[in-house]
Image: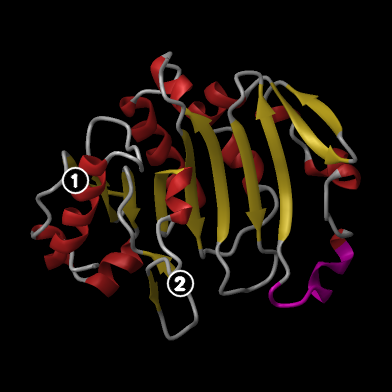
Amino acid sequence: MEKMVDYVVRILSFCPQKVDIVHSVLACPEVDRLIFPAVLYTGNDSTIPINSADQFNIASVSKELVRMPDAQKVEQLDDDQTLVIAELRGENNIEFSSTINLVQSPTPNVINLRFSSEHLQSEALTLSNLKKLFSELISVFQADHASIYDRKSIHRSKHPKYLRTANFRSYPIEMEWLTYFGPQMIELLGHERFTNLHTCVEKYDLHGGTMVILQEDPFDEDNPQHQERRIQAERELHLS
């Protein structure tokens, strides 16, 4: 029996966003292919069927969205207030969620897609698909950081590693299966670090930043060889 591994695609952006960014993200070709048809969670165990991004309309569903404040009260939110715009589950059990800050905040906007090794084994998702997905989402969401990680990695350390800046932003700097370092991160870390990175199967420029693919095989947090490869890559980038 094949081991089941749960993965998360996480896209972070400090760029100010509006609620309509969710429609733009859902309309990305790879997101559309992976998510729809889907149901939108609206709270109290209720759902709304959605078959395409065009059916996702904030104006028509906002009253049912969890923690969706009245639009006229947005300017009254606290500086650290976040808004959960949407949580969807596709028929193929790939989950989508978004958290958007409607006010200026050091907390990033986040897009998550959750999938499992079953989607990789069935080739519903391939490394090629994931690269396309990253390219689309990073561009539309104006991402500062993106990664795909084994969900077990959240227990990797009691103190996850971040690059913290004077304006109170925190950028994750742990290597994952796929990791995107945005333009601001490259500027803060220095281009020369990536010249010294050899423990990866691919690294390339993408939307002003650098994309790093650690290995061809899906990363398994329980695999000692995968762990050593990740640690070595972090050493070469002087992140450890």
Please state the horizontal and vertical placement of residue 188, each as a whole percent of the image: 28, 74
Between the C-alphas of marks 2 and 1, the distance is 23 Å
Vertical comparison of 228 with 219: above or below: below
**Between 49 and 91, which is closer to the camera in this rendering?**
91
Please state the horizontal and vertical placement of residue 141, each as a whole percent of the image: 51, 50
Q: Is residue 32 magenta?
A: no
Q: Is residue 73 magenta?
A: yes
* Residue beneath the point at 62% across and 37% down: 96
Tell me, for residue 107, which label it has, or none: none
Vertical comparison of 175 with 50: above or below: below
Please state the horizontal and vertical placement of residue 231, each as a whole percent of the image: 22, 55
Vertical comparison of 105 with 6: above or below: below
**Image quadrant where residue 201 sits:** top left
Tell me, for residue 170, which label it has, or none: 2
Magenta segment: 72-80
**Image quadrant where residue 89 sits:** top right
SS label for mark 1: strand
Mark 2 is on which residue type? Ser
